[in-house]
Image: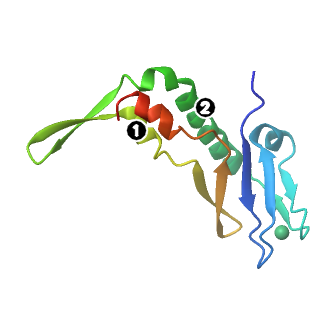
């Protein structure tokens, strides 16, 4: 059992740039975070916590399905040729940044996940 992904975001207070790290699970119990650098307080509403949870589940589902992803292709028609792109390759482009509105500002939540490595891609003859 995993405790969940660590998520971090930059404090939105002008010029603070402090990094705030949290787990979605802990936000369900106590939805208030404080920037350790400037003391700015962030209260997460239910909707925000729920969106973060959904995204966390998505990231987890993708990483759990990794062993089969190399066998999956997406066919693309390009200039009359049918090209198969390994689904795995597309996943390296999967953003692990979720942008959400918080207190009228757009905050980028960065999910700390292991990115698929280039070496792994080469194994699939990409
Ligand atoms: Zn701050």
> Which residue sits at x=80%, y=47%?
22
Residue matched to label 1: 89
Of residues 114 and 102, the one nearer the viewer is 114
Dot placed on the residue nearer the N-terminal end, 1 or 2: 2
Dividing the picture into quadrants, the one containing residue 73 is top left
Picture quarter with ligand 1: bottom right
> Which residue sits at x=73%, y=34%?
4
Q: Quadrant of the N terminus?
A: top right
The crowding category of the residue bearing disc 1, from other C-alpha atoms within 10 Å (few below 14, some 14 to 19, many at least 20), is many
Residue matched to label 2: 60
Q: CA distance from mark 1 to mark 2?
A: 17 Å
Residue 13 is situated, as x and y percent measured from the top left of the image, at 78, 74
Q: Is residue 79 left or right of residue 96?
A: left
Q: Is residue 104 left or right of residue 92?
A: right
Judge whether 32 appears above or below 69 on screen: below
**Element class at badge 2:** helix
> Which residue sits at x=43%, y=26%?
69
- Label 2 near label 1: C-beta < 8 Å? no
The crowding category of the residue bearing disc 2, from other C-alpha atoms within 10 Å (few below 14, some 14 to 19, many at least 20), is some
Ligand 1 has an atom within 8 Å of the beta carbon of the residue at disc 2: no
Of residues 72 and 119, the one nearer the viewer is 119
- Residue 63 is labelled as none
Q: Quadrant of the C terminus?
A: top left
Of residues 90 and 10, the one nearer the viewer is 90
Q: Residue furthest bottom?
A: 14
**Element class at badge 1:** helix
Ligand 1 has an atom within 8 Å of the beta carbon of the residue at disc 1: no
Q: How many marks?
A: 2
């Amino acid at each position: 059992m995993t405790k969940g992904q660590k998520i971090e975001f930059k404090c939105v207070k002008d010029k603070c740039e402090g990094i705030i790290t949290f787990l979605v699970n802990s936000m369900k119990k106590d939805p208030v975070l404080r920037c350790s650098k400037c003391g700015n307080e962030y209260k997460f509403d239910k909707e925000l916590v729920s969106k973060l949870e959904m995204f966390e589940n998505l990231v987890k589902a993708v990483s759990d399905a990794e062993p089969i992803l190399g066998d999956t292709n997406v066919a693309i028609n390009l200039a009359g040729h049918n090209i198969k792109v390994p689904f795995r390759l597309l996943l390296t482009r999967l953003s692990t940044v979720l942008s959400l509105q918080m207190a009228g500002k757009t905050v980028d939540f960065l999910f700390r996940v292991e990115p698929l490595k280039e070496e792994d891609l080469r194994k699939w003859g990409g």
